[in-house]
Image: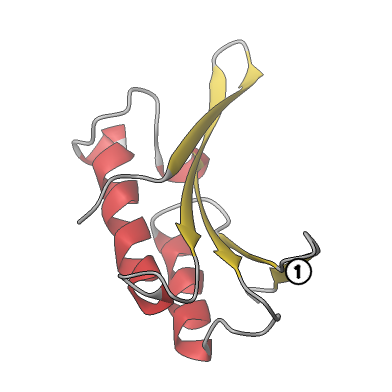
Amino acid sequence: MQKIDIMTIEKIKETSYLFRIIELKHPKSITGIDSSPSQLEYYINWAREDIGGHVRGAFQFNVKPILLVLARNFNIVQRDVINRIRELRNISFEPEILEINFEAQERRIELI
């Protein structure tokens, strides 16, 4: 397992935080996009304090995994990856998948 690409901490209220764990992928990444769900799951479990993790104040309700994919064209994230990211809502808060093309246009993939 590699290191977390980006982790942000947003203060919502005086004692309330949102922890975003962001996995960056390019279609030609060595680990590939299809490894992203398992990487994010590992990082979520690593962070969540309520299951023995390492980030104080990080719980299921405030750890948000995000897969951010850079691609020449949209629609490159396979259905299997989308479904596995969707399942992360069982251990985290509102997972997201975003695709960004080379013109910096963004597409959010619905996880309904």
Q: Position of residue 3 (x, y in %)?
A: 28, 45
Residue 7 vs residue 110, the one in the foreground: 7
- Horizontal side of residue 43 vs 23, given as left or right: left
- Horizontal side of residue 45 vs 104, given as left or right: left
- The number of callouts visible is 1
At 52% across and 87% down in the image, what residue appears?
A: 78
Q: Quadrant of residue 53?
A: top left
Q: Position of residue 10 (x, y in %)?
A: 60, 26
Residue at image mark 1: 107
Q: For mark 1, does the 10 Å Cα neighbourhood hold few (<14), some (14 to 19), or many (20 or more) residues?
A: some
Above or below, 21 against 84 in this view is: above
Q: Quadrant of residue 11?
A: top right
- Horizontal side of residue 69 vs 28, given as left or right: right
Q: Position of residue 31 (x, y in %)?
A: 31, 70
Q: Quadrant of residue 109?
A: bottom right
Above or below, 18 against 90 in this view is: above
| Amino acid, disc 1 | Arg
- Horizontal side of residue 1 vs 83, given as left or right: left
Farthest top residue in view? 14
Q: Position of residue 41 (x, y in %)?
A: 32, 59
The image quadrant where one finds the C terminus is bottom right
Label 1 element class: strand
Farthest bottom residue in view? 79
The image quadrant where one finds the N terminus is bottom left
At 59% across and 84% down in the image, what residue appears?
A: 76
Please, which colouring scheme is shown? secondary structure
